[in-house]
Amino acid sequence: MADLASLTKHEGKVPPGLKSNYDVDFVVHYKIPLPATERAEAEAAFIQLIQALADVGFATEVRNGGKSSLLVFTKIASNKLLTSQVYRYRVQDWLYGVRTAAPNQDLTKYFDDEPVTEAERLRLAYLLITKAKNEGGAGITPKVGHWKHVASVFPLHDHSFNRQWIKQWSTKYYLDDADLNQIRDKFGERVAFYFAFLQSYFAFLLFPAVFGLGAWLVLGQFSWFYAVVNSLWSVVFFEHWKTKEVDLAVQWGVRGVSKIQHPRPQFEFEREAQDPVTGEIVKVYSPFKRLARQLLQVPFALACVVVLGGLIVSCFAIEIFITEVYTGPFKQYLTFLPTVLLTIFMPTLSTLLTKLAERLTAIENYETQDAHQASFVQKIFVLNFITSYSPIFLTAFIYVPFGKILVPYLDVFQLTAQKFTTEGKPLPTKDWEMNPDRLTKQVIYFTVTAQIVNFATEVIVPYVKRKVFKAVEDVQTEIAEKKNGEDRGPKDVPEEAEFLSRVRNEAQLDEYDVTVDYREMVIQFGYLSLFSVIWPLTACSFLVNNWIEARSDAMKIAISSQRPIPWRADSIGPWLNALGFLSWLGSVTSAALVFLFNRGGDGHETSESHPNGSPWNISGWALLLSIIFAEHLYLVVQIVVRNVVAKLDNPGLQKEKAERFAMRKKVLEQTFGDQHVQEESSGPGMTGGEKITREALEEEAREASRSVSGTGSPEQMFWLRQRGASETIHIGRGLISEVVASNETKAQKKV
């Protein structure tokens, strides 16, 4: 694992363990169970792990992983196997319409023209490891069933790239296409799409930031003109991004890749049937049963409203009573009570509901990973919508219009607290007066203060916590070694020690989840779309925040997380629907806020026009008419903007049209030619009788090893210590025995 210091060091001062990955594709982190009674099971599962990897063409090396674990290093043993896998998947892309032309059968020229990227290699290697055996993979699914001892399968960070990446981004104001292409080549299109969206959103924020500053100085709050312009901006941004992501998908060669679904290992089928289109035997689960389970999302949403909404409303009422009604002792301390309650209960309840969402998504039993993720995102969006926007909705549409009716009911807090006072004396209170600045202060908190707090909890706190825990662990290990008089740490070969130490640290990191970062940006867009009419400087805050956010997310990937699996994607997925919903809801919310708070018409609040806590001076039919008019105007503007954006030049679509035209022209020229196509069964670059076998791959790897034996680089020598799967199994079993014996010795000494 790298740290901030290593990322900023000069190349010559970087530790050797960070300079090279020793040609490792993936590391399998294998946990050894502590009870000695499970040793036989752990050994058997380890043997099957190595055999499964070897059977699909991986060379393996095993090392001590520390903390009762092993590290199994893997790499694709043969370039021939890699070539065949790349060619096969590119042909699949062509058959599904992702590629406009079939791969050239002259493989040497083809791979010179379109070389294999690092992300493509790692993605195909991961698929080889995790795909089911009947699909040509090893069938290894971490933490599931037979592979419960496999804690994770992860690629190693390229720290040379990470160092240059962070250095470049820290000195650039705007990310260009070259930066996004670098991310795509290293981390895959799924991560690249996130940074592309973040950069596009950042660029679009320039207009509302400048316009919002002018509106704040000239128009004031709750300006109908600002509301119209802001709603128009949200429509333009939404429609622009829909076109932009298609453009990027075409440029990156992944348009339509979402049609190629990856099956979920956890999918449980009811029966097998013949596909009416392909004639293949497929696994089937009743769509009616899934629909019945999907309907559970309705009570789930209601549960979120009741649980989270109930907590927010309760804390909201307590805060109103303490800050605006109560005048007794300790008021300056009691004002923190709602914050303390939310801090204690909100994370706990959100975690429980998130786990419930995961469970509901699991029982819906989707065949593919994408369908499973889309369903889970829908549930998470409901959770975050409630927790993020409920306080502002309560203030704007409950506290302000109905305060005089509802606040008297807060006497329940006074009556409850009175029972605990001496002689049952009533608490000192005052008559309630509405706080006109409450709504603005809330929006400022969520758009400024909460963004800063989120940055600290997302980036700074995890880094500091990890460094502290590591320091404590080192101290405990040192004390134990002095007490026992021996070094109980892993005994590494000196030239590998720094590299293995880094890998052990990376194995302890959390997996990077791009969904978390998408969620932050979408929720932030919601604040701008729904509530910036309250505080027009909202976009200025987000503009500064998002410049920092792009760099902090890069730091999070490089330092605080395992390297993400470079999955492909052709869009931002289900978050696009969330953006569209928030854009539409913003038009409705803005209309309601302007009607309620600026009926004077000049953008400045007056005592006559501002709501006073009583609903009697609010015309319900006029409010409803304003909302309906704004919503219909939004839909009309959206159609117009969509048609205008569709007519603009799109480089990606022009490229796709040019490629398809060239392909049609080539096919027509070759229609009456004598060219022949190789039989698919012979595979790329192989004769019909040549087959890729485990023995052939191992022999090829040995031949390569002999050529460098004794004179090779550290990376080459790393893969010479164990010759073949049988020796890896032998060494691994020995390490398991050492760990089990060490644990037994520790247990006996404690007794």
Image (cartoon, grey):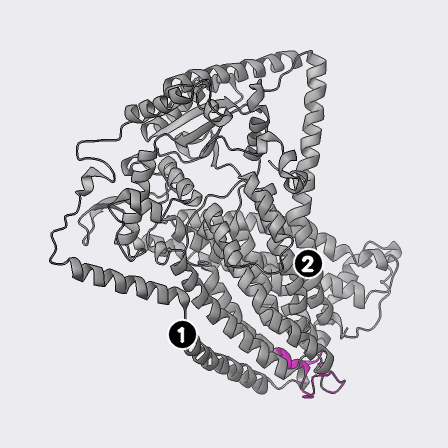
Q: Main secondary structure of the magenta part?
A: loop
- In the image, what residue type sits under mark 1? Ala
Q: Which residues are magenta?
A: 593-614
> Label 1 belongs to which residue?
646
Q: Quadrant of residue 115?
A: top left
Q: Quadrant of the N terminus?
A: top right
Against 564, residue 378 (above or below) is below
In this rendered view, identify the residue nearer to me: 596 or 536: 536
Q: Quadrant of the C terminus?
A: top right
Against 396, residue 8 (above or below) is above
Mark 1: which secondary structure?
helix
In this rendered view, identify the residue nearer to me: 347 or 430: 347
Against 454, residue 326 (above or below) is below
Q: Which numbered dot is residue 450?
A: 2
Residue 604 lies in the magenta-colored region: yes
Q: Are marks 1 and 2 in contact (CB under 8 Å)?
A: no
